Amino acid sequence: MKGLRQFTLNAAMLFALCAAQTFFLWMFFVAGGLERLAELGHIIGPASMNVKAPAFDFAARWRHGMAGGWPLYMPGFFVTAAALWRRAAGLSLRRVIAECAVTGALAVIVAWLSAPAGASLVLDSFHSETGLRCAGSWPGVTGRVVGQGVFTLISWNSFVLSSQLAIVRKSFRPLIVPATLSVALILIRPFTVGDFTSLWAQRVRQCDPVAIFSALLIPLLSALLLWILLRSRNPQ
């Protein structure tokens, strides 16, 4: 009976991890569709206006939950961090990496197949904010978007796992890996950490409730995840 409960718990945590990674990538792929429409010249706007710039700006903010009415900033990052941290607590790093590779591969497929279902969400929000319309059929997810999304997910996963390892080993050395990946991420993506953090801080100063709630969730979730890690290492 105990073995069955453990199997069920493991299956549930792996499903949660795969679902979180799928959601993470889905937001990237849907936003990438809007960028592709802009690249193809399917954004309708004034002749004197460079419609590509607002499309890319909106897509960058949408994939981070900062446009389109999301109730939480960086939702994909939050849910992935929670699911991965919980799964990794008490397990070997090699096993967790192997599981991430499998769930991540499944997440790419599911997110890619379900991306067209999010077209109306991003297009309606884009029109509501900018007044610009999109013509033409929804494009497929390009290799560039898939690559950027997957690399961002890998970078974020490495940060979560390295943070847990740094706490366990009481050393900052494991954080070298995500720091290196972050530098590479800044080079391949136009919307960097500095962009969304400055926008986030600006909206907090403007008393935006979503921005404030999202900011407060960081220390609250961090404290919860630390408690989960300590509890997994000291069950007593």
Image (tube, rainbow, N blue to C red):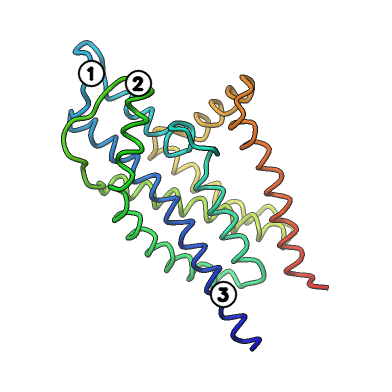
Pointer 1: residues within 10 angstroms few (<14), some, or many (20+)?
some
Measured Cα–Cα span from mark 2 to mark 3: 45 Å
Question: Quick check: marks 2 and 3 in contact, CB under 8 Å?
Answer: no
Measured Cα–Cα span from mark 1 to mark 2: 10 Å
Element type at mark 2: helix
**Mark sitting earlier along the chain (2/3):** 3
Give the residue displayed 54% in from the left and 38% down from the top: 71
The image quadrant that residue 22 belongs to is bottom left
The amino acid marked with disc number 2 is Thr
The image quadrant that residue 215 belongs to is top right
| Farthest-out residue, right | 236
Residue 24 on image: x %, y % = 45, 50
| Residue to which mark 1 is pinned | 45
**Mark sitting earlier along the chain (1/3):** 3
Marker disc for residue 175: none
Marker disc for residue 130: 2
Element type at mark 1: loop
Question: Quick check: marks 1 and 2 in contact, CB under 8 Å?
Answer: yes
Task: Look at the picture and state if 156 lies above or below 3.
Answer: above
Pointer 2: residues within 10 angstroms few (<14), some, or many (20+)?
few
The amino acid marked with disc number 1 is Gly
Residue 2 on image: x %, y % = 66, 86
State the quadrant of the N terminus: bottom right
Residue 77 on image: x %, y % = 53, 47
Give the residue displayed 71% in from the left and 43% down from the top: 219
Give the residue displayed 44% in from the left and 48% down from the top: 152
Give the residue displayed 23% in from the left and 18% down from the top: 45
| Residue to which mark 3 is pinned | 10
